[in-house]
């Protein structure tokens, strides 16, 4: 079976995608610099699939190291590229770190793929490229708006670099997957989200509050023009998201793509408010969550949820897991890692 490189494969979405690739029989090689992940995730993956992926600790900024890697693994047929910095707030304070780590490394990676006989490239993008969309649900044709942060800009620029390169590189084809909000964990609780320090994202902050690691959840504003006043997002279970990566990769490997560069929104198609997520946690955990309403967070958009028609029809993929499934698995994972 084809050998697939997963960069950032020990990260949250990366590790869940490695599991699904192995479940489908692919040979997986992981590159990760461990800057935002832990080597223990390799054991977590192995404990689920029974197959230990090949792992190489490598920072994609290390061009010599990347050269050696591709000289060794010149039989790679596909790449799923997760490795990038992804903290919105940090990107505002350190833009050059984000352009160096997310853009320079992408360019060098693509230069390696140009040398391969053929390469299928899956790019980890984000609904953040849409900003606050004018129309909901959001389709892939929605206009890409001025990025709200250097992080979001690196996703927009990344997509354009890949699109322009595929246009003139016959042996390279690519799909950009625009994630909405990935949440949850593998049902085994052997892998899950491992935020470093104080979580920026809602769900890990909720589960850490539930376990007592955090005193109280701050809900950033309840004066938005939404039914309950809190922001709305499309929370997609990370396992559904991981399966979409395998389906997209197979589309390219089996030459079923309709263009050399395509984009797909990956969400549930359903919006949930912050307070609805809190209630889902309380439902699945049986606990009452300690939270308070505070002021709005700078840069938050009001509402975003996906129109999933294109992914449903073209990829033949749809989400199977619910918000409750996601909260249940996130809670099970939190309890396990704190036990
Ligand atoms: C969701 C909602 C917050 C924390 C970000 C990135 C996006 C992607 C996913 C990488 C918002 C509210 C949150 C808290 C809260 N990352 N919230 N209290 O901002 O939609 O997306 O993560 O690709 O690019 O922008 O996700 O989980 O941070 O926030 O009230 O302690 O929860 O205001 O309404 P977001 P989030």
Image: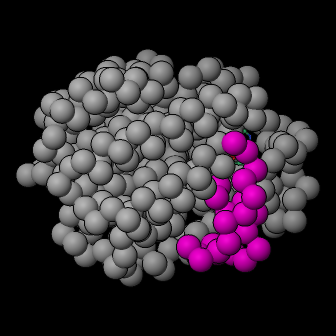
The answer to whether residue 287 of the structure is visible from this angle is: no
Can you give x and y, in whole percent of width and height, for residue 88 in the image?
68, 39
The answer to whether residue 132 of the structure is visible from this angle is: yes
Left or right, 17 with reference to 29? right
Query: Of residues 22 and 100, which is closer to you in this image?
Result: 100
Can you give x and y, in whole percent of width and height, for residue 248 in the image?
32, 64
Q: Which residue: 62% across, 20% down?
A: 197
Q: Which residue: 45% across, 42% down?
A: 106
Task: Work out whether 238 lies above or below 264.
Answer: above
In the picture, residue 190 is in which quadrant? top left
Picture quarter with ligand 1: top right
Q: Which region of the structure is painted magenta?
A: 128-150
Task: Work out whether 126 lies above or below 261.
Answer: above
Task: Work out whether 21 lies above or below 12.
Answer: below
Name the colour scheme: one colour
In the picture, residue 269 is in which quadrant? bottom right
Asked if the stretch drawn in magenta spans residue 330, the answer is no
Q: Which residue: 29% across, 51% down?
A: 114
């Amino acid at each position: 079976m084809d050998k697939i490189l997963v960069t950032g494969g020990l990260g949250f979405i990366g590790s869940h995608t490695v599991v699904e690739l192995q479940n489908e029989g692919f040979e997986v090689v992981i590159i990760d610099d461990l800057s935002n992940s832990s080597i223990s995730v390799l054991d977590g993956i192995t404990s689920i699939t029974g197959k230990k992926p090949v792992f190489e600790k490598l920072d994609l900024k290390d061009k010599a190291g990347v050269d050696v890697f591709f000289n060794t693994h010149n039989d790679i047929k596909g790449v799923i590229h997760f490795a990038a910095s992804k903290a919105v707030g940090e990107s505002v304070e350190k833009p050059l770190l984000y352009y160096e780590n997310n853009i320079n490394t992408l360019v060098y990676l693509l230069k390696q793929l140009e040398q391969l006989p053929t390469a299928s490239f899956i790019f980890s993008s984000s609904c953040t490229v849409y900003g606050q969309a004018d129309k909901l649900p959001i389709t892939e044709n929605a206009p890409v708006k001025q990025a709200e942060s250097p992080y979001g800009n690196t996703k927009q620029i990344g997509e354009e670099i890949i699109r322009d390169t595929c246009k003139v590189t016959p042996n390279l084809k690519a799909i950009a997957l625009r994630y909405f909000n990935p949440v949850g964990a593998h049902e085994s609780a052997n892998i899950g989200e491992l935020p470093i320090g104080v979580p920026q994202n809602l769900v890990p902050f909720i589960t850490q509050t539930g376990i007592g690691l955090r005193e109280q959840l701050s809900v950033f504003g309840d004066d938005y023009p939404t039914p309950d006043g809190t922001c709305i997002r499309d929370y997609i279970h990370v396992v559904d998201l991981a399966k979409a990566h395998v389906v997209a990769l197979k589309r390219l490997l089996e030459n079923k793509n309709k263009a050399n560069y395509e984009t797909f929104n990956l969400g549930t198609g359903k919006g949930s408010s912050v307070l609805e997520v809190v209630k889902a946690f309380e439902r699945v955990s049986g606990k009452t969550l300690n939270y308070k309403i505070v002021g709005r967070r700078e840069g938050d958009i009001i509402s975003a949820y996906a129109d999933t028609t294109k992914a449903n029809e073209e990829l033949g993929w749809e989400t199977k897991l619910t918000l409750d499934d996601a909260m249940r698995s996130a809670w099970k994972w939190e309890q396990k890692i704190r036990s």
